Amino acid sequence: MKLALITDLHANREAVEAVLAHAQSQGCGQHVFLGDYVGYGADPGWVVDCLQAHLADGAVAVLGNHDAAAVQGPQPTMVPDAREVVAWTHQQLSLSQLDFLSKLPVSARDGDRLYVHANAYAPTAWGYVTARLDAVRSMHATDARLTFCGHVHEPLLFHLSSTGKVGDFTPVPGVPIPLSPQRQWLVIPGSAGQPRDGNPAACYATFDTVSGDLTYHRVPYDHEAASAKVVAAGLPQRIAQRLIDGH
Amino acid sequence: MDTEAEPPRPGSRLAAGQVIDGFRLDEHLHQGGMANLWAVTRLGSDDPMPLIMKVPRIKGGEDPTSIVGFEVEQMILPSLTGTHVPKFIAKGDFTGQPFIVMERLSGDSLRKRFDDAPLPVDEVVRTGALVATALHELHRQHVVHLDVKPSNIMFRKAADGTRTEAVLVDFGLSRHDFLPDLLDEEFELPMGTGPYMSPEQVQFIRNDPRSDLFALGVLLYHLLTGERPFGAPTSVRGLRQRLYQDPLPPLAWRPDCPPWLQELVLRCLEVQPDKRHQSAAQLAFELQNPDQVVLTERAQRRARSGRVQTLRRWFAALGAEPAERGNAAAQAARSPILLAAVDVANAEPALLESVRDTVQRLLHTEPGARLACLAVLKINRIGMDELVDKDGGSKHVSLLVQLKHWARPLVQDLEETRPEQAGRVTFHVLEAPDAAGAIVEYARKNQVDHIVMGARSSGGLRRYLGSVSAEVVAQSDCTVTVVRSLLRSTS
């Protein structure tokens, strides 16, 4: 079966719609959502409803730090931009939507695959996997051969051999990578709703559970419309600009 | 070759007759350092393609080199296509019995010919052109082989049954631009085969396709002289010698080595990749067009550099870090071969000028490009042709003169702006009954990336000659630009 791995949707309806349509064209049979459904974007309610519909349809979803924050409401420790967005998002969501988010699991396991938002070693401390050492720490913390996580918005791939050698790789969109069963892999598909590698196109990945091929994708979407909605919602200008720049 | 049904070797559980994932082991063919090879049959398949199964040897516990090399080959081989690689069929991973099943090539590897080196010059040249052509195909698919050596080169008859093609095997040390390099961090020693390893491989650079040209240079040197240019070092210190000590020129071993061939072989063996040919296709091109090789001081060498020169290089090599380089396919794409097919004898001046302008623009945008100018001398299909005109001059020479005259402004412009590129402009007159067929065949054989030629214009004869471009567009594998003259002809 082909899985669609989608993460860091960040209330970006235009991006999520484009990614879901692309995943359908790829023949994906199951969706896996790796957290951060809300925060930053202008359509938190729509994205949460969309997620609920997919879950009813057999999808898997785990909790992200922005989802936890939206449930909790703004905290004094947050930076001003984040506090503003969290407060706004919290207001936008209905009680039942907040309740749904609050009940999402921190991680999920399916055979040799682990799904978790930030990392496997301390999932709710939300530490980022940005370098080889973080990746090794995460892979050592699980016996799952494959870890799929989000949190980091740039697409990345790490691997750890049986002799303890670690490597990292910046994936090329559209090229299937056969994930050798002889090693552990940590897959970061990259953010669907707020890409940060200089390319505004939405990120996600597909994984074929039979062939073992992983493919990263970039899906162009109407990021100008999404950005305009952020401005119209009265959210910080900087957040709107990020969607245009992809940074 | 071992033809007996092999009993299982120590440490190997396999035996003839055993079935693995639907493949029956028929015959144990070879035991190498890293793997065993078995002839196999796919049960229930009527595909006549002979198959081979490669099974890694796991030596005493977990041996990282053979395991990771096998992982790498399992990752890269399925992504490769074309006639210059064995066709991938199936793979099995280390959770069960690890294997790769691929097309079995008949015949021997090039290894066998090495026992007879030095070989005749024309055989060395032919072999070099075949291997360079295969390497270019590989580089175009974003892969650097990184273990080019005689035992990894096989041959097959091309689909048309007339030509021979080289087939590259064993991708255990290879590197794919678009896939993770599992070997990158794995080992603390340079990876490759001692005698063939390029200087940059010694320095842990694994993404430069020109490394394969260095290895091919070593191979050609050996075939030509019967000697290895850098011996067979087994230590890192021994390997590093090639960073500063140049090889004895082939002419010192073999006085009948043509200077142009020495030029090419020594260029392959340059320490700096920038001084080698910039793509395998450019090397293949020169091996097939020896009269077009620009001879430099390399062609004249009779001895190694003096001690002072060597010492200077030794200092330069101390702690020298090779520059980061691009990737395999980008390097190949940056060095395209451009073919200007020009009907110098018949086309109208305005069209000839337009073709030249187009070529010039392309050369400006591709500083690494090499330009081949081609004219076709039409001959009859049957019977002897009069290739000497009424005045006793050779038509062939006359066409060549016209072709060079046509290209003069281009060459002059290059000499002023990029002298090195000017030296890479070559001229060819082909004699053929069918101009389009000759152009297409030439482009294919020389791995031309882009053909530029003039379009049909008015007039009876022109219409006939002009149809050549339509035929070339239809038949050729590469990009074709058909140029029309914007200046209306007055005739």
Image (cartoon, coloured by chain):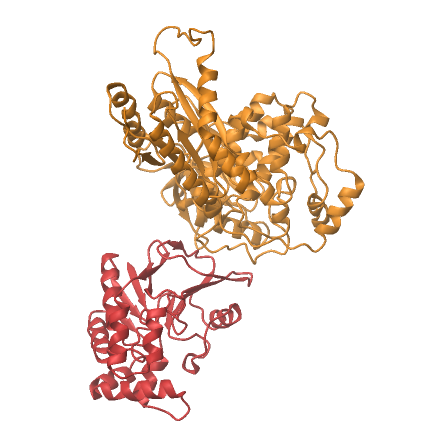
Residue placed farthest to the right in the image? B307
**Quadrant in which the N terminus of chain B appears:** top right
Left or right of residue B296: residue A32: left
User: Which residue occupies 38% across, 32% down?
Assistant: B353
Q: Using residue B52 as the reference point, say whether residue A68 is left or right of it.
A: left
- Residue A34, image x, y percentages: 33, 72
Q: Position of residue B92 (x, y in %)?
A: 41, 49
- Above or below, B247 against B224 in this view is below
User: Percent position (x, y) of residue B79?
Assistant: 40, 46
Residue A107, position as x, y percentages in the image: 36, 76
Q: In the rendered image of this protein, which colour is used for chain A? A: red
Figure quadrant of residue B24: top left
Which colour is chain B painted? orange
- Place residue B193 in its image quadrant: top right
Q: Nearer the viewer, residue B428 or B199?
A: B428
Q: Residue at left 33%, top 61%?
A: A218
